[in-house]
Structure formats: structure tokens, C-alpha cells
Amino acid sequence: MKNVKSTMLIAVIGMMIMMGAYQHGRLEAESAVAPAKIGIVNVTKVLETSQKHKQWQAKMQAEREVMQAEFKAMEKDLAALTESIKLREPGSEDRRKLTKEFIEKKAILESKDASYQEIVTEEMHMWTESLYKKLLVVIDDVAKKKGLDIVISSEDLSVPAPSLRDFMLTIKTKKVLYHRPQYDITDEVLTALDASK
């Protein structure tokens, strides 16, 4: 009888240990995270090849052509003034007036050029920032529709690079070195970005 009680006690203790281990394993399994579903997007490709960006580039090109025509007209005027100055007697009042006019017009041209460059740089900055913000919203939407947990940016490595500095910068910023093609959602993101408002 004593043996039976001892065996029963050992069996009960064993069952309690097994139940505790089972509960512990079940809790661990419930808290374990499933492998993440990942998507890859070539951000540079999307930004550079989107229809929105191409339309913006066309608008900027049209503005650039108008400005270049204005600059050429001003340069032509300066060239004509230079030739006119050469024909005048050194030290004459007429030559001084033309020289003054040349200097003033040249300063205006240089000022307009500097101003134009600054405006273009600012517009490019604002446009790229705006397009990138839209891109992030589109990536979020596409990722949710595809049930992705993570989207990583992948950039193409240009070889040969224009300079060692550019090459080293690309190496330092390149995060994805390899991925299977089925993880790439660049084309879907590009299509969604072009369709967005």
C-alpha cells in the first residue's frame, strides 16, 4: 500500500511537471513571432521613372528653355555692346556710357542666372521631398494589401561609378545586397504612385 501511494504521488508530481512544461511551451509558442513577410522597393527607380516625375521634368524643361532664350538674348545684347564699345574712341563720353551700360547689363544677367539656379535647386528639393512623401504613403498601402511586415529600399549600384567618393557612398548606403526577385514590389509601387493623386 505504501508503494502504491508513493507511485501515485510520483505520478501526480510527474503529471504536474508535464502540465507546467506544456503550459510554458504553449505560452512561448503564442508569443513567438512568425517570420516577417518582406518586400523590396528600388526607391530611386520609382522616383526617377514615375509619370509624375516625368511630367514635372517636362514642366521644368519648358521653364529652362524660356530662361535660356532670355539669357541668349541678353548675351547677344552684351556682345553687340562689346562690339559697339570697340568702335568708340577710348576715353570718349560715348564709350564710357556704353561701358557703363555693358557692366550694368552683365551684372543683371549674372544676377538672374544665380537667382534662376537657386530657384531651380529649391524647386527640385521641394518636388523630390513631396514625391518621396507620396511614395511612402503608396508603399504603406501596397505593403498592407500584400500583407507585408517590412519593406526595404534597394538601390542599384552604378559601376563604374563617376568617382571613388560616389562609389564609396553607394557602398555605405546600400542595404540590400541580395534578394529573390519575387520579393521585389518596385513595379507595383510605381504603378500605384502613378495612379495616386
Image (cartoon, rainbow, N blue to C red):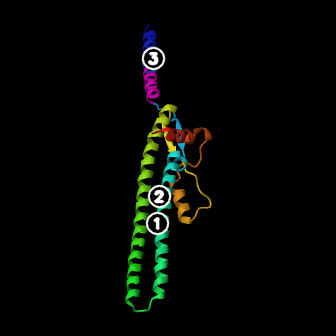
* Rendered image: mark on residue 63: 2
Q: What residue type is labelled 3?
A: Met
Q: Name the residue under label 1.
A: 70
Q: Nearer the viewer, mark 3 or mark 1?
A: 1
Q: Which amino acid does label 1 sit on?
A: Glu
Q: What element carries label 1?
A: helix
Q: In this view, does 28 lie above or below 87?
A: above
The quarter holding residue 94 reads: bottom left
Residue sitting at x 42%, y 10%? 5
Q: Mark 3 points at which residue?
A: 15
Alpha-carbon neighbours of circle 3 within 10 Å: few (<14), some, or many (≥20)? few
In magenta, the rendered stretch is 19-31
Q: Earlier in the sequence, mark 2 or mark 3?
A: 3
* Residue 12 rendering spot, x and y as whole percentages: 43, 15
* CB atoms of marks 3 and 1 within 8 Å: no
Q: Is residue 16 left or right of residue 57?
A: left
User: Which SS type dominates the magenta stretch?
Assistant: helix
Residue sitting at x 47%, y 58%? 63
* CB atoms of marks 1 and 2 within 8 Å: no
Q: In this view, does 151 lie above or below 24?
A: below
Q: How far apart are marks 1 and 2 (CA)?
A: 11 Å
